[in-house]
Amino acid sequence: MRWKEAPTSSLVWLAGGILFSTPNETGILAGTSAGQLLAAAEDFGFQAKRALITPKELLDTEGAWLCSSVRGVAGIRTLDGNALPFDPALTARLGTALGFALRA
């Protein structure tokens, strides 16, 4: 099983210095927020790429987020009871890139 998106948000993750989101060719709607983050990846010192990922593979990333034009960027802190890396400063910077104010 590959994880593609959430009901009202797009999945974005960081692995090996590359900011990923799912490919538009999967049949899901193109996430505008995810697209904005991938377009801004260089500003964060990352490369950008589209790929698929399994929930198990997501556990080995440097961080993962759900992003939407309504809610901004939300860090995924656990998945199936397993902790994921969470960087509040990077999460805030990603949110700011989408026009959302920094959160404490």
Image: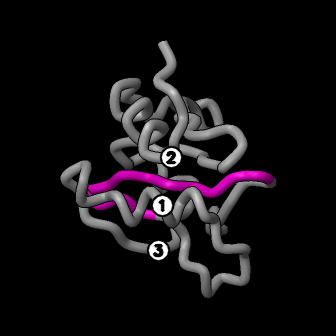
Looking at the picture, tell me which residue is in the foreground, 7 or 94: 94
Residue farthest along the bottom direction in this orientation: 25
Label pair 3/2, CB-CB below 8 angstroms: no
The stretch in magenta equals 8-20
In the rendered view, tell whether residue 22 sits above or below residue 91.
below
What residue is drawn where x is 46% and y is 74%?
51
Q: Which residue bears the numbered disc 1?
A: 36
Q: Secondary structure at mark 2?
A: loop
- Looking at the image, residue 63 sits to the left or right of residue 16; the answer is right
Looking at the picture, tell me which residue is in the foreground, 69 or 82: 69
| Mark positioned earlier in the residue sequence (1 or 3) | 1
Looking at the picture, tell me which residue is in the foreground, 31 or 3: 31
Q: Amino acid at mark 2?
A: Leu
In the rendered view, tell whether residue 102 sits above or below residue 82.
above
Tell me the distance, in whole angstroms, between the alpha carbons under discs 1 and 3: 16 Å
Tell me the distance, in whole angstroms, between the alpha carbons under discs 3 and 2: 21 Å
Q: Secondary structure at mark 1?
A: helix
Q: Amino acid at mark 3?
A: Ala
Magenta highlight on residue 19: yes
Q: Which mark is residue 51?
A: 3
Residue farthest along the left direction in this orientation: 45
Q: Secondary structure at mark 3?
A: loop
Q: Amino acid at mark 1?
A: Gln
Q: Position of residue 91 (x, y in %)?
A: 43, 34
Label pair 1/2, CB-CB below 8 angstroms: yes
In the rendered view, tell whether residue 90 sits above or below residue 54.
above
Tell me if mark 2 has few (under 14), some (14-19) or many (20+) residues whose alpha carbon lies within 10 angstroms of its own.
many
Q: Which mark is residue 98?
A: 2
